[in-house]
Image (cartoon, coloured by chain):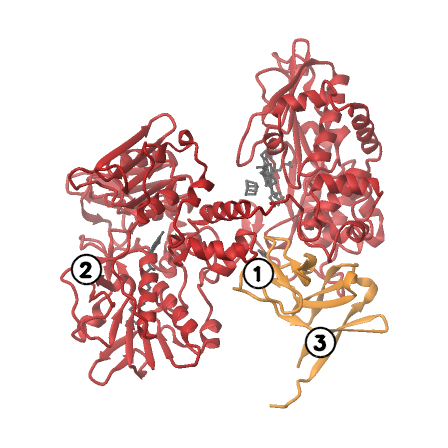
């Protein structure tokens, strides 16, 4: 059977995938024509192109994929004519290919309203990789950007303009509110507030009457007489199905566009099918990928002789803007008589939730979520599967008060509920995979394909995994990886007991197999915490995490950064000059870090020992910026100069930093000392922080900056310096002994039973009777500290490793290159 | 076409130049090849040095190990892992590494490159 597919977009590709899976006896001859130059790519995640994804990353499959499945792919060659009489298609390049069945998957193009001036330079659409390339290069000289259209796509485009550095970006919407098709009035208001907080200007009820400018756009004028200055415009005012080919050969199309199809997805010619965004099914164009995928499946089934029809698909969606949760599902607006609506409008926490419920209160019809869409998956499933609602239906959006955990919610879904609508994976299929032994979301993604589309269902897949494992009594043990059946804490005790000193010895005695990138750095870190030996000693060198192995952080492009320790942030003019000289000599980019020291970026691997030799000769030492180790102890200027300072915070910070420098731990450790409660050193955001009081020092622990900021908690008050240090000794050793790998102190405390009270008992009241031991162990580590860069520089065996080519040590990696930027250099953008 | 593949053996370095259970990068004309000594299994492997994910010349600096007994290397950048035997990416099936045969003779290591 000869099947010709016109269009190699997302749905056309999915159809190929479905057909290839069915083509077990080579019964199909598949030929695909694509107008674009590349094989089908992931348009849904198109915006990630601006976040650094390359065209290749977005590909759904490369050309080799088609070839290896016997699919003939003609790219950059649109079909120009269909002769239905002889059942042949004619392409732009002159190919004539006969078919038994023809599948039109020509998608849609952006609808561009006929506004006077729309043809000017600087007006773009947002549909293909080429569009984004054009936008990206124009954006460089743009200060003001405007998106016409405040729908799902328009908002995504507007966010992309912001991310491209156009701080002054506006959205112009014809309707009186944003996302008029998915979100109701109240929800749209909140959404608008949130977008404005991101920096977007929103103009609703605006009808654009002309685009101003000579050759290039300079502004827009509106029907109400107002004007908006702009240097570029992205039009996102809707889609226009690509039905021109069908129309030209006499296939029926809708009055407002789209190729008319029946429930079998046949067009008015039953040898011709249409799927995806070009198909008009029961007066409806589906501008989403999931219904398109379902259509692909239906046609593949038909051609294979299986009964399957398309009877419509729900249009639930979730906006993909980071930080802004918006979702709408089922019927977001209740219109039928008797429908009940529950609305939760929380002005304080900034969320709006609305659900529409049947008159009898039993079923969910649809709803809108703005500000917090964490219940989206569950609500969508409840709606689609017509699950019976709890007696107090408001519980489904109140969440926490309802008391039912997400995991339990998942349990109530029927087996045939689609968890992943992009790939049509049912709950049953996922549970089956778990039962047959898959234990991680990664593995489930690979074997069921769930979560590989838009990824929105992954939280649900995870809940399902945990729930199923628990239900089967399978214990989710907190082991390090497949090579060690121990938690980090157990391993720490065992390694100490057996006095093991190298990774290989630990693996031989306590593990199985050959190790991996999870257990090697964990064990290496634990060995360093226990014995404090030089980490690059033979045998342990290749077990170190990549950054530790080269004593530097690896950068984009393969160069490294150099961060000398600057205790407490105090540095002499002479040392500043040395840093400047070294940076100039080795062409390094310099920057003041967030940790009160200076980072030198862009060093070639083979220059690292030379650079460090010079720094060490000038009195610097390693700053351990690359290690899971003590980083910086920040200070404020304190009582030596500040009129409010109670004690000398700089001196104390230096003392602390020098005491714990080089200390290796499950994760990095940061600290700070402030001279008074004004807290200029931000000690309360650190793993441990110290603040001067009238009577001494207050000690705070387990704070965190980063992605989930958390304030440190007060552990003890009004301490003298010696006591403060003793408490820190105990506290740090207790953390090192008991935390899981890569767990910062805040998370460690959050998981600790008994929380801060328990911790205070251990550290201050010595409830475990371990205080003396903990202090002694810490003293041992403090006494055995040596600067590992000094040792590396002095050891020819180790120095040898800092070359790019083993057989051409004098040559640098020729693939490394830099761009100039503000009188310095930057790493070349990666592909 | 000839029926038999001819193989040229490129002299890379001596056995001692390669750290135990680690890798080095070998310059072979314009090409960069990552050479690994999997001492624990007493095996040698070679792959392209470029990680296909973000096209970074770093795989020789990656950590080697095993997954269900399959020897693999993890890229230092984003920890994508690749089979050292087939070059296949073990996290997703999109990209794969080129692999090369390795021969050790009298303390010298040779990498097989097609001619
Ligand atoms: C250089 C610096 C940014 C700067 O230019 O200012 C920096 C750079 C990096 N940070 Fe940071 N962080 C820097 C200060 C911070 C701070 C601010 C601070 O320390 O006061 C924070 C928030 C405070 C905190 O950690 O609680 C910070 C929170 C993070 C996190 C998130 C940690 C968390 O628990 O959420 C990561 C990711 C991680 O560690 O897993 C991270 C990871 C990184 C890495 C190592 C990412 C990586 O793996 O490559 C960056 C290395 C860049 C490089 O190539 O050298 N960096 N990073 C700062 C170095 C300070 C220093 O002198 O050592
Ligand atoms: C920025 C952006 C974000 C999006 N976000 C989401 C989202 O979050 N969720 C969601 O569900 N959907 C989203 N979509 C919509 C989704 O991408 C589309 O629904 C999907 O791509 C439709 O697939 P298709 O194959 O029907 O059309 P397309 O992907 O447009 O493919 C059609 C292809 O056919 C080609 N073609 C046309 N005519 C011919 C011809 N005569 N000969 C040969 N080839 C031809 C076209 O060049 C094109 O390559 C988004 C779209 C965009 C642009
Ligand atoms: S916040 Fe830290 S990790 Fe993120 S880009 Fe900046 S330096 Fe890198
Ligand atoms: S560059 Fe190798 S994993 Fe990203």
Q: Are marks 1 and 3 in contact (CB under 8 Å)?
A: no
Label 1 CB, ligand 4: below 8 Å? yes
Q: Position of residue A806 (x, y in %)?
A: 76, 63
Q: How many marks?
A: 3
Reading the image, the residue beneath label 1 is: B55
CA distance for labels 1 and 2 = 47 Å
Left or right position of A319 against A557: left
Tag 3 or tag 1, which sits nearer the N-term?
1
A391 w.r.t. A605: above or below: above
Which chain is painted in orange? B
Q: Are marks 2 and 3 in contact (CB under 8 Å)?
A: no
Q: Nearer the viewer, mark 1 or mark 2?
A: 2
- Mark linked to residue A282: 2
Within-10-Å neighbours for mark 3: few <14, some 14–19, many 20+: some
Q: Position of residue A814 (x, y in %)?
A: 64, 62
Q: Are marks 1 and 2 in contact (CB under 8 Å)?
A: no
Where is residue A622, by image quadrant? top right
Q: Position of residue A599 (x, y in %)?
A: 64, 40
CA distance for labels 2 and 3 = 62 Å
- Which one is nearer the viewer's eye here, A808 or A280? A280
Reading the image, the residue beneath label 3 is: B112
Where is residue A412, by image quadrant? top left
For label 2, the SS is loop
Determine if marks 2 and 3 fall on one subunit. no
Q: Label 3 marks which chain's residue? A: B
Q: Position of residue A371 (x, y in %)?
A: 37, 35
Q: Label 2 marks which chain's residue? A: A
Q: Quadrant of the N terminus of chain A?
A: bottom left
Which chain is painted in red? A
- Mark linked to residue A138: none
Q: Label 1 marks which chain's residue? A: B
């Amino acid at each position: 059977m000869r099947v010709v597919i016109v269009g190699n977009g997302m749905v056309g590709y999915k159809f190929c995938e479905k057909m290839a899976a069915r083509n077990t006896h080579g019964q199909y001859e598949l030929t695909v024509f694509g107008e674009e130059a590349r094989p089908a790519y992931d348009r849904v995640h198109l915006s990630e192109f601006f976040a650094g994804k390359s065209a290749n990353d977005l590909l759904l499959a490369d050309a080799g994929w088609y070839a290896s499945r016997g699919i003939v792919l003609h790219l950059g060659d649109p079909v120009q004519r269909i002769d239905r009489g002889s059942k042949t298609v004619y392409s732009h390049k002159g190919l004539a290919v006969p078919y038994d069945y023809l599948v039109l998957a020509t998608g849609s193009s952006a609808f561009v309203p006929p506004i006077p001036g729309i043809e000017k330079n600087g007006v773009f659409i947002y549909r293909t990789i080429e569009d984004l390339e054009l936008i990206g290069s124009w954006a460089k000289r743009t200060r003001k950007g405007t998106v016409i259209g405040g729908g799902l796509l328009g908002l995504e485009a507007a966010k992309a303009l912001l991310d491209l550095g156009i701080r002054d970006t506006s959205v112009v919407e014809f309707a009186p509110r944003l996302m008029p098709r998915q979100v109701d009035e109240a929800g749209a208001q909140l959404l608008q507030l949130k977008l404005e907080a991101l920096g977007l200007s929103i103009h609703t009820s605006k009808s654009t009457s002309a685009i101003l400018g000579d050759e290039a756009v300079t502004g827009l004028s509106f029907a109400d007489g107002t004007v908006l200055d702009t240097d570029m415009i992205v039009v996102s005012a809707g889609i226009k199905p690509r039905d021109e080919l069908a129309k030209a050969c006499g296939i029926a199309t809708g009055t407002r566009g789209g190729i008319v199809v029946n429930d079998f997805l046949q067009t008015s010619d039953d040898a011709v099918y249409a799927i995806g965004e070009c198909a008009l099914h029961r007066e409806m164009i589906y501008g989403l990928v999931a219904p398109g995928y379902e259509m692909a499946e239906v046609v593949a089934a038909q051609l294979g002789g299986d009964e399957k029809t398309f009877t419509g698909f729900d249009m639930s969606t979730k906006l993909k803007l980071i930080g802004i949760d918006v979702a709408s599902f089922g019927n977001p607006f209740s219109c039928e008589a008797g429908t009940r609506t529950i609305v939760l409008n929380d002005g304080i926490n900034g969320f709006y939730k609305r659900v529409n419920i049947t008159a009898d209160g039993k079923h969910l019809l649809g709803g809108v979520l703005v500000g917090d869409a964490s219940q989206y998956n569950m609500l969508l499933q409840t709606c689609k599967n017509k699950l019976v609602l709890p007696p107090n239906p408001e519980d489904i959006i109140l969440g926490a008060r309802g008391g039912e955990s997400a995991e339990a919610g998942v349990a109530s879904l029927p087996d045939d509920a689609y968890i992943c609508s992009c790939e049509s994976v049912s709950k049953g299929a996922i549970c089956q995979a778990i039962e047959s032994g898959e234990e991680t979301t990664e593995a489930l993604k690979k074997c069921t394909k769930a979560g590989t589309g838009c990824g929105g269902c992954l939280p649900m897949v995870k809940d399902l995994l945990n729930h199923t494992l628990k239900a089967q009594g399978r214990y989710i043990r907190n082991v390090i990886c497949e090579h060690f059946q121990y938690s980090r804490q157990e391993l720490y005790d065992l390694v100490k007991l057996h006095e093991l000193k190298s990774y290989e010895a630990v693996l031989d005695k306590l593990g199985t197999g050959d190790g991996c990138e999870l257990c090697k750095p964990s064990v290496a870190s634990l060995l360093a915490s226990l014995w404090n030996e030089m980490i690059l000693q033979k045998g342990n060198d290749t077990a170190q995490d990549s950054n530790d192995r080269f004593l530097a952080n690896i950068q984009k492009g393969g160069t490294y950064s150099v961060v000398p320790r600057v205790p407490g942030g105090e540095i002499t003019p002479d040392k500043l000059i040395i840093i400047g000289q070294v940076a100039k000599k080795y062409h390094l980019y310099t920057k003041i870090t967030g940790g009160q020291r200076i980072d030198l970026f862009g060093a070639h691997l083979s220059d690292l020992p030379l650079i460090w030799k010079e720094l060490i000769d000038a009195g610097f030492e390693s700053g351990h910026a690359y290690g899971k180790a003590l980083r910086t102890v920040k200070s404020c200027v304190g009582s030596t100069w500040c009129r409010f300072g109670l004690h000398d915070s700089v001196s104390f910070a230096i003392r602390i930093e020098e005491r714990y420098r080089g200390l290796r731990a499950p994760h990095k450790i940061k600290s700070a000392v402030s001279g008074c409660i004004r807290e200029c050193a931000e000690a309360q955001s650190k793993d441990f922080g110290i603040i001067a009081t009238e009577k001494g020092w207050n000690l705070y622990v387990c704070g965190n900056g980063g992605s989930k900021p958390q304030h440190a908690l007060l552990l003890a008050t009004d301490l003298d310096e010696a006591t403060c240090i003793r408490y820190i000794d105990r506290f740090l050793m207790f953390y090192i002994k008991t935390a899981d790998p890569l767990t910062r102190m805040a998370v460690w405390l959050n998981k600790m039973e008994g929380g801060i009270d328990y911790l205070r008992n251990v550290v201050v009241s010595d409830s475990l009777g371990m205080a003396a031991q903990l202090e002694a162990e810490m003293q041992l580590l403090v006494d055995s500290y040596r600067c590992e860069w000094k040792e590396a520089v002095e050891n020819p065996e180790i120095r040898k490793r800092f070359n790019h080519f083993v057989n051409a040590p004098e040559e640098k990696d020729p693939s490394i290159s830099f761009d100039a930027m503000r009188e310095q250099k930057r790493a070349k953008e990666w592909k | 076409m000839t029926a038999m593949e001819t193989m040229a053996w490129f002299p890379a370095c001596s056995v001692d130049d390669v750290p135990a259970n680690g890798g080095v990068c070998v310059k072979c004309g314009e090409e960069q090849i990552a050479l690994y000594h999997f001492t624990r299994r007493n095996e040698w492997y070679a792959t392209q040095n470029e990680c296909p994910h973000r096209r970074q010349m770093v795989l020789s600096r990656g950590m080697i190990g095993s997954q269900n007994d399959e020897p693999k290397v993890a890229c230092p950048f984003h920890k994508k892992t690749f089979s050292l035997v087939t070059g296949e990416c073990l996290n997703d099936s999109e990209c794969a590494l080129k692999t090369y045969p390795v021969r050790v003779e009298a303390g010298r290591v040779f990498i097989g490159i097609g001619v």
